[in-house]
Image (tube, rainbow, N blue to C red):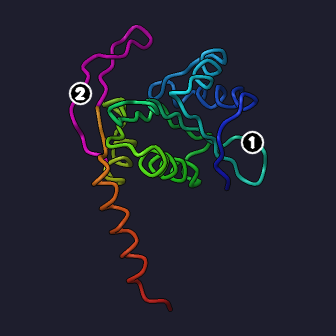
Amino acid sequence: MMIRPALPADVPQIVAIEQIPEYRNYIGAWSAEEHLRAMANADNEYVVVHGEEATVQGFAILQGIQSEHHSLHLKRIAVRTPKRGFGKALLEHAMDRAFLHHRAHRFWLDVFETNSRARRVYEGYGFRYEGVMREAILLDGEYHTLALMSLLDHEYTARQQHSHQTVTATPRL
């Protein structure tokens, strides 16, 4: 498994992942042109993950890289095939990039309130529920509410220290 910065040549595969029918009610979808514009913006960072093959298996978009408030936004994260470890790797990489590389104070995201699976995953990584943006997204003629979640730098650091202590304290068999 390899995670690397996305290239313009990856955009068709990113768009294809967004178009997976099961994701229609959970993530946004942009045109290739919108992704290329966003990718060219210095305030955004795109990463992709792939296995042994060259096919992009997932992507993440971080926004707010240049935020004077040190508040980065996980705009989008999606994988081609769930439950293969690509999403976990992407989320951990995005968190590391936000806090270790970009020195974020706050890393936040919004998720469809009805996407309980994703909310549980984010909670498992220490993200805390902050509230909602009521009926913020119009999709197929219906308004949808977004849950806001965030992780602060000291929470990320405590989680990393706890994870490291758990690993080092585990006896080898």
Residue 92 position, x and y percent, is 48, 52
Residue lying at 28% horizontally and 16% vertically, measured from the top left: 135
Query: Which of these two is toward me, 9 or 41?
Result: 41
Residue 98 in picture, x, y percent from top left: 44, 44
Extreme top residue here?
141
Percent x, y for residue 158?
30, 62
The front one of 91 and 96 is 96
Residue segment shown in magenta: 127-147
Rendered residue at 36%/40% (across/down): 107
Which structural element holds mark 2?
strand
Q: Is residue 96 above or below residue 164?
A: above
Number of marks present in the image shown: 2
Asked whether, in this view, residue 87 is left or right of residue 73, the answer is right
Pointer 2: what residue? 132
Residue at 63% from the left image edge and 41% from the top image edge: 48
Amino acid type at mark 2:
Val
Question: What x and y, as percent, mark residue 113?
Answer: 31, 31
- Residue 128 belongs to magenta span: yes
Query: Label 2 crowding class (10 Å Cα cut-off): few <14, some 14-19, many 20+?
Result: some
Taking the view exactly as shown, the residue that stands out farthest to the front is 68
Q: Amino acid at mark 1?
A: Thr
* Structural distance between the alpha carbons of marks 2 and 1: 35 Å
Can you tell which mark lies on residue 110? none
Q: Which residue is mark 1?
A: 55
Q: Residue 91 in magenta? A: no
Which part of the image, by quadrant, shows the N terminus? bottom right
Q: Residue at x 33, y 61 (%)?
A: 159
Badge 1 marks a residue whose secondary structure is: loop
Magenta segment, principal secondary structure?
Answer: strand
